[in-house]
Amino acid sequence: MKSTTLIGILGLTLLNHSCGEQPLPSAKSNATIKVLDERGNPIEGVVVGGTYFDKITNKEGFGSGVNKSKTAVTNTEGIVTLTDETRSPLVFFGIRKAEGYYQHHPHEHEYKSQSGGIWQPDNPLIEFKLKPIKNPIPLHAKRAKLTIPKEQEWIGFDFEKADWVAPYGNGIVTDVSFHLASRFDSYYDQESTFQIRFPHPMDGAVNLDIEPLQKGSTLKMPYMAPEEGYATIPDKTLFVDPINPEHKTNVSHRNYYFLRIRSVVDENNKLIKANYVKVHNDFRYVVDGKTIKRFLINYYFNPTANDRNLEFDMKKNLFKNLPSEEVPLSP
């Protein structure tokens, strides 16, 4: 997370805490940071830091924040203690530098109270588990957003071309097909079903429940697609009842998928060839009014047959000159 974004979040959060209340006195923040690898082994020499938000000013209109930062380096046990004075109960702790490991999103810690000039509970243990950089490779990676050209029809999508297949786009190979059926009377009275199908018997998906992109390691999924366990994907649905206008949907930002596509089998129905894809944040679709219908997908496609490695090298995207809104945000 960029520092300017972090400062903005802290400022808005503290502003919400402090509106209508007397400013809190400064107190000491103590916290122990522990950094481990995936196997639970301590990592020495990691630079960790705390961002402490001190006060709100109104010099720039809505409000701006005054913050300060403290850094330290983990010892042989992967531990370090950070101490500083702050008025805010909120402190962002994070990994500033860890050679050979993927970045990790900051941890937002909120103290409950002050006692004796010390934020309480005193000295919480905050743990980070880092994923090592292993073998990142070039992939076709993109945050794609396409207009759904037609309803009530199966339409093929080509991951390598990032487009619908003919006659709706420049795609050549149908890697997966989608089907949308929707009714939209208003934002509070609508229903839709988005179906997903694979063209070959050994194609399919493995669904993983993973924390959202803004939490944990920037490498969200396992390094390799699994060999087995591929199945169909349940239909995605949205329903809004005008009497009780709650949006009910099974589309979730916690849904991540490995896909096996372009599968080929021998005469004994044994898999001999396939390609692999990973998908972040589900297969998403938008129906907004009678005419606006979109498909959104964050995916990574490995064009090398039978290579299950999906650890993406963010400096070597096989899609060239992507606009900023389509560039992947994580490896």
Image (cartoon, helix red, strand yellow):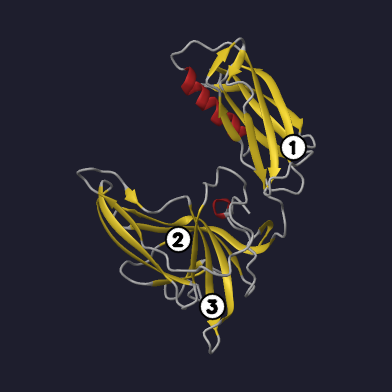
User: Which residue is drawn at the image coordinates 54% and 69% (left, top)?
Assistant: 228
Which residue is label 3 attached to?
Answer: 263
Q: Quadrant of residue 129?
A: top right
Proximity of marks 3 and 2: CB atoms separated by less than 8 Å? no
Percent across and percent down for residue 259 are 52, 66
Amino acid tagged 2: Leu
The residues tagged by marks 1 and 2 sit, at their Cα atoms, a distance apart of 45 Å
Percent across and percent down for residue 92 are 61, 30
Amino acid tagged 3: Ser
Which mark sits nearer the N-terminus, 3 or 2? 2
Which residue is label 2 attached to?
Answer: 146
The image quadrant where one finds the C terminus is bottom right
Question: Which label belongs to residue 78?
Answer: 1
Q: Secondary structure at mark 1?
A: loop
User: Which residue is drawn at the image coordinates 62% and 46% (left, top)?
Assistant: 217
For marks 1 and 2, give the one nearer the viewer. 1
Q: Secondary structure at mark 3?
A: strand
Please indicate, yes or no, whether residue 319 appears anywhere in the rendered image. Answer: no
User: Which residue is drawn at the image coordinates 53% and 87% (left, top)?
Assistant: 268
Which mark sits nearer the N-terminus, 3 or 1? 1
- Neighbourhood count class around disc 2 (C-alpha, 10 Å): few under 14, some 14–19, many 20 upward: some
Q: Residue at the far bottom: name it.
A: 267
